[in-house]
């Protein structure tokens, strides 16, 4: 199965209008491999500016979160219909920082996945274990517990329209990347878990790796058979490094 390779940028609460300008100017000039898509997810506030500046066929815009409710008295929140006013195609959901800092449960993440799909947007569903859970050999059960509520909420067939990002929490922003072999073994587990529900769907779902990906380690990671690209934090804020990663990544 040839899945497209995806390089996604999660700016988190970083960046400014200057970075929007510099990054979009550089990305507009990048030559991407035929089978490669790039997704840039700045803060909500910069979506409009980024949309106005990005002009590349295979570079898309994403948000970092959304509220599951359609509208209402939810001060400070953003709805899917608001995202639809911009050329946003993807929404990162269930990032480990949302799960830990903002106490999002897998069930609430599942509801957001449903809302995002209903709005015709593509969720980038983040899952991953903590260092403690890996040491206790709970990685697979933790991933299954994060995936199952989403399967229950939307049904396995809908995973046709979902991107999954496996991000071990211990590797996010720490410089401790999973080795390509360790990441591949976990991605293979995720694909097998999906396959136990539906083999065709499991074959099609793009599985991204996230956790201290940079220009030095991305090629070895993305070359693994079940790794279809990456979700990048720190490296996605560096114009030279991120554009270099995008232009060197090979599509499958
Ligand atoms: C992330 O925030 O999703 C991430 C993977 O960050 P970093 O690349 O900095 O580890």
Image (spheres, rainbow, N blue to C red):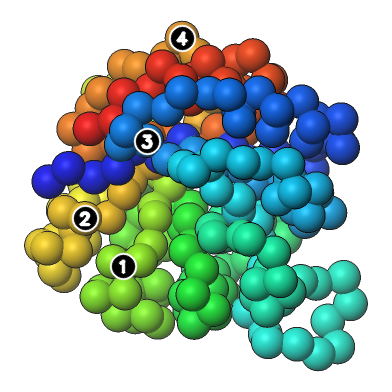
Q: Earlier in the sequence, mark 4 or mark 1?
A: 1
Mark 1 crowdedness (10 Å alpha carbons): few <14, some 14-19, many ≥20:
many
Q: Which is closer to the viewer, label 4 or label 3? A: 3
Real-space Cα separation, disc 3 to disc 2, in angstroms: 15 Å
Residue on which disc 4 sits: 216
Element at label 1: helix
Tag 4 near tag 3, CB within 8 Å = no
Judged left or right of residue 26, residue 146 is left
Sequence-first disc among 2 and 1: 1
* Position of residue 69 measured from the top left corner of the image (x, y, whole percent): 67, 85
Task: Respond yes or no on whether mark 4 lies under 8 Å from ligand 1.
Answer: no
Distance from disc 2 to disc 1, alpha carbons, whole Å, reads: 9 Å
The answer to whether marks 3 and 2 mark residues whose Cβ atoms lie closer than 8 Å is no
Write the residue at 30% across / 42% down. 4
Mark 3 or mark 1: which is in front? 3
Q: Which is more N-terminal, label 4 or label 2? A: 2
Q: Quadrant of residue 119?
A: bottom right
Q: How far apart, in angstroms, are the residues tagged by discs 4 and 1?
A: 31 Å
Left or right: 238 as drawn, with respect to 148: right
List x then y, in percent, for residue 208. 39, 41
Secondary element under disc 4, as helix, strand or loop, is loop
Q: Which mark is residue 204?
A: 2
The reply to whether dot 2 and dot 4 touch (C-beta < 8 Å) is no
> How far, Cα to Cα, is label 2 from label 4?
27 Å
- Residue under numbered circle 1: 159
N-terminal label among 3 and 1: 3
Count of numbered labels shown in the rendering = 4
Q: Position of residue 176 (x, y in %)?
A: 51, 20
């Amino acid at each position: 199965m040839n899945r497209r390779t995806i390089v996604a940028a999660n700016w988190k609460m970083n960046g400014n209008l200057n970075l929007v300008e510099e990054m979009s100017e550089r990305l507009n000039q990048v030559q991407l491999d035929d089978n490669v898509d790039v997704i840039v997810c700045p803060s909500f506030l910069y979506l409009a500016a980024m949309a106005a500046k990005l002009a590349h066929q295979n570079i898309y815009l994403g948000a970092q979160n959304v509220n599951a409710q359609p509208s209402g008295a939810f001060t400070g929140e953003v709805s899917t219909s608001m995202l639809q006013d911009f050329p946003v195609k993807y929404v990162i959901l269930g990032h480990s920082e949302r799960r830990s800092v903002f106490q999002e449960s897998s069930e609430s993440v599942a509801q957001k996945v449903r809302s995002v799909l209903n709005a015709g947007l593509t969720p980038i569903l983040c899952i991953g274990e903590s260092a403690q859970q890996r040491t206790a050999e709970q990685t697979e059960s933790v991933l299954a517990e994060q995936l199952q509520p989403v399967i229950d909420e939307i049904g396995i067939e809908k995973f046709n329209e979902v991107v999954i990002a496996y991000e071990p929490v211990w590797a996010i922003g720490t410089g401790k990347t999973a080795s390509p072999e360790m990441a591949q073994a976990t991605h293979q587990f995720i694909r097998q878990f999906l396959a136990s529900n539906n083999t065709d769907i499991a074959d099609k779902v793009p599985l991204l790796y996230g956790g201290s990906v940079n220009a030095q380690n991305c090629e070895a990671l993305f070359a693994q058979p079940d790794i279809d690209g990456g979700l990048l934090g720190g490296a996605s804020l560096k114009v030279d490094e991120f554009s270099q990663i995008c232009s060197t990544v090979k599509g499958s």
